[in-house]
Image: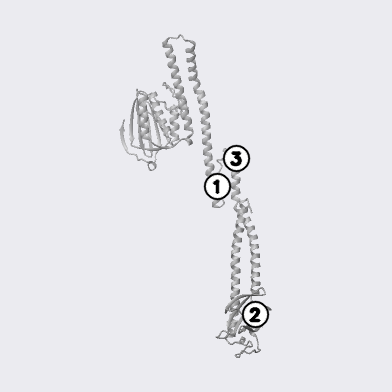
């Protein structure tokens, strides 16, 4: 037998099976109790009849006196159908009275209660000795046919009531299950409406129905939210790829054109003097380096936009900034870098390469657009970590500070070479790590850039401690 395919059918079948199992157990127990009570009633009746005989009551006159002679007399003991008595004396049945069947067996060898079969019908028997020497012996028998008929009536009643109960239970279970699965039907209808990525933001109904259905709806809504986030991340990654291709094609056109022009000039003029040739070669190398820097910057922006796929780890910000300043001194030997580190250890959970990219771009931007001095400070301010970089350059006008945080945007007074991606990468990484960025005036006379990151000491593996060291 195959289980029903629908939940409603399975619940109804389960209810019927449970009721049938309970009915079988309960019916068997009821029939056993009725049979036990009936046998006990028959046994009591047999004992009462024997007591009347042994006690010298009206039933004592069985036709056998003290001299063991047959005598006639009344038989009040045998009133009622289905009962008879017989007396055994010296191994012979000497007396039988009542509804004696044709094939009545002699009394059993052992005294007491017993169940015997006569012509295939069950009888209940009680045998006792009438004298101390064990003879004669009296046997009183009562037919169990009335009890069997009563058991059959009870059995038919139990079966009938059980079948009726099964039918009513099946109908009730089907009806109640129909009501119970309505929230599932609404949930199914809501899920069926989710046919595309644009439908992932529509939550499924989770405010009605049983606790299990509400829990399922909540789990499905969480799954839809995760799918929406994954889809959004994929869309951002695709958009970043398209933007990368578009920006690369647009921004690389100029340096590639200059590079081609220089190569053509070298090819068409093999007789150029050494100085002109060296100048074209240097210009070609510069264009090639610009292309490399531009591609690196575009790649960094594209990776930052795919935030969900970036590896996360605990990063010691003080160590990272210290290493970035050391490398900046090597890249810009003509610039003086001063590091004011007011924290000993501070762990941020984020993308380590992105935080290093942020620090490198801040330092390179300050060295390229500043003068001869760059000041770097790292401090804790309440629940935030603040990284600031100041230079002594020309700075950026207040009205342009928001614009230069966009890709390929440069200040109007910028004269140093660059791709216009440095501060855009910094702003992207700050946002990626839940921080804020602010551009202002430096005490050195140039631009001051401050990046702030939220910091929870209880969640960090190391604690903050004032150090006040300058490098």
Asked which quadrant contains residue 224, the reply is top right
Q: Quadrant of the C terminus?
A: top left
Q: Residues within 10 Å of mark 1 (few under 14, many from 20)?
A: many
Residue 400, compared with residue 116, is above or below; it is above
Residue 195 is marked as 3
Q: Which label sits on residue 217?
A: 1
Front position in the image: 377 or 244: 244
Q: Is residue 67 above or below residue 408?
A: below
**x, y percent for residue 387:** 38, 33
Q: Residue at x 58, y 47 (%)?
A: 187
Residue 115 visible? The answer is yes
- Residue bearing mark 2: 83
Which marked residue is nearer to the observer: mark 3 or mark 2?
2
Q: Quadrant of the N terminus?
A: bottom right
**Front label number (2 vs 1):** 2
Mark 2 Cα shell of 10 Å, populated few (<14), some (14-19), many (≥20):
many
Report x, y in % for residue 118.
65, 75
Dots 2, 1 in contact, CB < 8 A:
no
Q: Are marks 1 and 3 in contact (CB under 8 Å)?
A: no
| Residue under the point 52% across and 41% down | 226
**Colouring style:** one colour
Name above or below for residue 393 compared with residue 166.
above
């Amino acid at each position: 037998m195959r289980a029903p395919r629908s939940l409603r059918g399975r619940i109804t079948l389960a209810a019927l099976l449970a009721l049938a199992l309970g009915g079988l157990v309960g019916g068997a127990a009821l029939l056993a109790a009725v049979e036990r009570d009936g046998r006990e009633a028959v046994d009591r009746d047999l004992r009462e009849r024997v007591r009347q005989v042994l006690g010298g009551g009206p039933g004592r006159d069985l036709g056998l006196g003290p001299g063991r002679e047959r005598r006639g007399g009344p038989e009040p003991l045998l009133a009622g159908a289905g009962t008879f008595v017989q007396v055994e004396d010296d191994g012979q049945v000497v007396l039988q009275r009542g509804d004696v069947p044709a094939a009545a067996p002699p009394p059993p060898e052992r005294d007491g209660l017993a169940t015997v079969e006569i012509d295939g019908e069950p009888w209940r028997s009680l045998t006792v000795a009438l004298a101390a020497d064990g003879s004669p012996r009296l046997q009183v028998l009562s037919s169990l046919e009335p009890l069997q008929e009563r058991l059959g009536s009870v059995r038919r009643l139990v079966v009938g009531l059980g079948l009726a109960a099964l039918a009513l239970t099946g109908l009730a279970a089907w009806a109640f299950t129909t009501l119970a699965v309505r929230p599932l039907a609404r949930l199914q209808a809501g899920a069926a409406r989710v046919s595309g990525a644009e439908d992932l933001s529509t939550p499924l109904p989770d405010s009605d129905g049983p606790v299990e259905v509400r829990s399922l709806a909540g789990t499905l809504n969480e799954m839809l939210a995760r799918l929406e986030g994954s889809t959004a991340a994929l869309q951002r990654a695709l958009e970043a790829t398209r933007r990368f291709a578009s920006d690369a094609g647009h921004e690389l056109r100029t340096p590639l054109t200059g590079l081609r022009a220089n190569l053509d000039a070298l090819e068409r003029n093999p007789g150029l003097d050494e100085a002109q040739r060296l100048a074209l070669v240097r210009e070609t190398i510069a264009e090639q380096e610009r292309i490399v820097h531009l591609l690196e910057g575009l790649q960094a922006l594209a990776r930052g936009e795919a935030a969900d796929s970036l590896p996360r780890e605990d990063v010691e910000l003080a160590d990272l900034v210290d290493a970035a300043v050391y490398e900046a001194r090597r890249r810009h030997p003509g610039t003086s870098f001063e590091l004011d580190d007011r924290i000993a250890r501070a762990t941020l959970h984020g993308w380590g390469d992105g935080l290093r990219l942020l620090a490198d771009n801040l330092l390179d931007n300050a060295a390229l657009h500043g003068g001869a001095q760059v000041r770097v400070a790292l401090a804790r301010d309440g629940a935030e970590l603040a990284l600031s970089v100041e230079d002594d350059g020309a700075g950026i006008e207040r009205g342009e500070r928001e614009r230069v945080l966009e890709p390929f945007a440069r200040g109007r007074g910028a004269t140093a070479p660059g791709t216009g991606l440095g501060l855009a990468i910094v702003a992207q990484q700050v946002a990626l790590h839940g921080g804020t960025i602010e551009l202002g005036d430096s005490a050195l006379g140039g631009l001051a850039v401050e990046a702030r990151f939220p910091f929870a000491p209880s969640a960090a593996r190391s604690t903050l401690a004032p150090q006040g060291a300058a490098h």
